[in-house]
Amino acid sequence: MCGIVGLFLKDPALEPQLGALLTEMLITMTDRGPDSAGIAIYSAPEAGTAKLTVQSTAPGADFPGLAGMIEAAIGAKVSVVVKDTHAVVTLPEAQLDAARALVRSKATLKVMSAGEGIEIYKEVGLPKDVAARFDVAKMAGTHGIGHTRMATESAVTTMGAHPFSTGPDQCLVHNGSLSNHNGLRRELIRQGMSFETQNDTEVAAAYVSHKLQESQNLGEALESGLNDLDGFYTFVVGTRNGFGVVRDPVACKPAVMAETDQYVAFGSEYRAMVNLPGIETARVWEPEPATVYFWER
């Protein structure tokens, strides 16, 4: 059944607390999905730089030489911050595609996310354990999305965990099941998209990425999805500047939102938001079926 949380900050004073607030929200949703968990954190980008978040099945062997390997390939200096099985590589923005291609050529390395401001951390395990492994509670940022998974249609693996990131600074989490994902995957492959898993959520993420590449904004991409994605779903999507929510026309998957002058929050259940600052005076509502909600900076 899965649990989703999201937080889009309007008030910069809350940015140092983003990781802590999201972590608490996600831990509250543990009983909705004990298989795996993940969090995407967005922070304000530094001009001219980009970040590549990499996961390794052999971090002790891969990470000590990671910076040197990338520097030799792209001809530019990089910095690497290791967090357990993940490493965040900061590098010149112009070299991001070359570095990502290099990482993808290594069997033990996987790209979790790439872009100016996004970092994604995900692994098999309970939210409290996954968040602790990566010190998510200490992270600052502008907005973020979290997911705890109960697997129903694909393997319990790191790559099968959410969020899925299939485009620069874009990610998606999902509660539900798509019925036409196989056909959509084939069509998106013909359009030049690539896939790492058989998970239906990766198809939804790639669909949004494809629409963004066609110059639609996030709201338009999610509107298009209402026509093209069949099944039961609640999606929460992040982009470098945006945060969006949409439910299918039946809307059988639970969802609740809250908004104050300081933030917009999403939870699969209201209890995920009860400890947010000012929640007692927030506007709280259930997102309508087949209705797109999105906020952008």
Image (tube, rainbow, N blue to C red):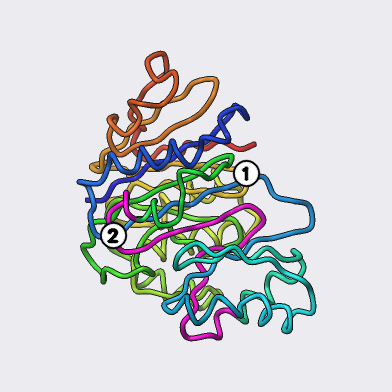
Taking 3 as reference, is 86 left or right?
Answer: right
Badge 1 is on which residue? 241
**Within the magenta stretch, is there residue 106?**
yes
- Kindly indicate the quadrant of the structure image that contains residue 186: bottom left
Q: Is residue 282 shown above or below 22?
A: above
**Mark 2 residue type:** Gly
Q: Quadrant of the C terminus?
A: top right
> Vertically, is 197 above or below 82?
below
- Looking at the image, which residue sits at the far top? 281
Q: Amino acid at mark 1?
A: Asn
Q: Tell me: 74 left or right of 197.
A: right
How many dots with numbers? 2
Q: Which residues are the magenta region?
A: 103-129
The location of residue 206, given as percent across then percent down, is 48, 64
Is the residue marked by circle 1 packed among few (<14), some (14-19), or many (20+) residues within 10 Å?
some
Q: Secondary structure at mark 1?
A: loop
**Mark 2–mark 1 contact, CB under 8 Å?**
no
Observer-nearest of 146 and 177: 146
Who's the residue at 47% across and 48% down the image? 237
Residue plotted at (76% across, 65% down):
92
> How many residues crowd mark 2 within 10 Å: few (<14), some (14–19), many (20+)?
many
Q: Position of residue 169 (x, y in %)?
A: 59, 56
Name the residue tied to disc 2: 125
Please provide percent x and percent y for residue 100: 62, 74
- How far separated are the C-alphas under marks 2 and 1? 29 Å
Q: Is residue 76 above or below residue 254?
A: below
Q: Is residue 159 magenta?
A: no
- Compare marks 2 and 1 and give the one earlier in the sequence: 2
The image quadrant of residue 266 is top left
